[in-house]
Image (tube, rainbow, N blue to C red):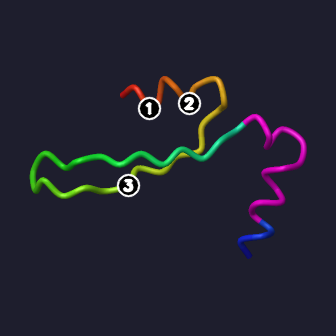
């Protein structure tokens, strides 16, 4: 399954998107969690700056 998902991102317009994984600290508990999103390549730096 994973190979099929990767293959679909490599064809056509899928190359203009990236999966961004950001580690965020929860203000309530202090625990860290991972925020995963698929964003356009032009918006990667803006998403990481938040």
The residue most toward the left is: 28
Label 3 residue SS: strand
State the predominant SS element of the stretch in magenta: helix
Where are the magenta residues, as a range? 5-16
Q: Are marks 3 and 2 in contact (CB under 8 Å)?
A: no
| Image location of residue 5, percent across then percent down | 75, 63
| Image location of residue 26, percent across then percent down | 19, 49
Q: Are marks 1 and 2 in contact (CB under 8 Å)?
A: yes
Label 2 residue SS: helix
Q: CA distance from mark 3 to mark 2?
A: 16 Å
* Residue topped by disc 2: 44
Q: CA distance from mark 3 to mark 1?
A: 12 Å
In this rendering, position of residue 49 left or right of residue 15: left
Quadrant of the rendered image containing residue 22: top left
Q: CA distance from mark 1 to mark 2?
A: 6 Å
* Residue topped by disc 1: 48
Placement of the C terminus among the 4 image quadrants: top left
Label 1 residue SS: helix
**Residue ID at (59%, 44%):** 38
Q: Is residue 20 above or below residue 46?
A: below
Q: Decide: few, some or many residues near mark 2? Use Cα within 10 Å; few <14, some 14-19, many ≥20.
A: some
* Residue topped by disc 3: 34
Of callouts 3 and 1, which one flags the residue occurring earlier in the amino acid sequence?
Answer: 3
| Image location of residue 19, percent across then percent down | 60, 47
Q: Nearer the viewer, residue 38 or 45?
A: 45
Quadrant of the rendered image containing residue 34: bottom left
The residue most toward the right is: 12
């Amino acid at each position: 399954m994973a190979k099929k998902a990767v293959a679909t991102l490599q064809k056509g317009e899928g190359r203009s998107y990236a999966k961004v994984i950001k580690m965020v600290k929860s203000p309530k508990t202090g625990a860290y969690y991972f925020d995963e999103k698929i964003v356009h390549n032009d918006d990667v730096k803006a998403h990481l700056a938040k």
